[in-house]
Image (tube, rainbow, N blue to C red):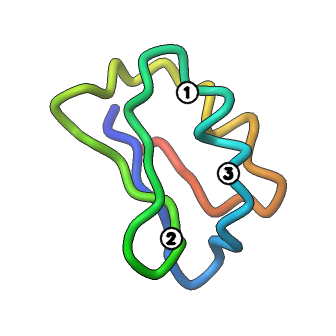
Amino acid sequence: MPVTVNKDLCIGCGACLDGCPVGALELDENGLAEVNEDACIDCGACVADCPVQAISQE
């Protein structure tokens, strides 16, 4: 299931970047998380690591 970031909820803390085993997340020009869909392995680690539930897997 693809991972998506709700940019309205993201606070740019970087917890998801630290938790991603393949480095598929980065901060965009506004300091908010975004997913590199080509690199993402849909493991869900970032979903679990996000303290504000801005990342979902649906």
Mark before the other along the chain sequence, 2 or 3: 2
Q: Dividing the picture into quarters, in which one does residue 41 lie? A: top left
- Residue at the spot of label 2: 6
The vertical placement of 37 against 22, above or below, is below
Alpha-carbon span between mark 3 and mark 1? 15 Å
Percent x, y of residue 10 = 63, 71
Alpha-carbon span between mark 1 and mark 2? 15 Å
In the picture, measured across the screen, residue 16 lies left or right of residue 28, that is: right
Quadrant position of the C terminus in the picture: top left
Residue at figure coordinates x 75%, y 37% from the top left? 49
Q: Residues at badges 1 and 2 in contact (C-beta under 8 Å)?
A: no
Q: Secondary structure at mark 2?
A: loop
- Residue at the spot of label 1: 44
Along the line of sight, which residue is nearer the eye, 34 or 53?
Answer: 34
- Residue at the spot of label 3: 14
Q: Residue furthest front?
A: 29
Mark before the other along the chain sequence, 3 or 1: 3
Task: Say what amino acid the circle numbered 3 marks.
Answer: Gly
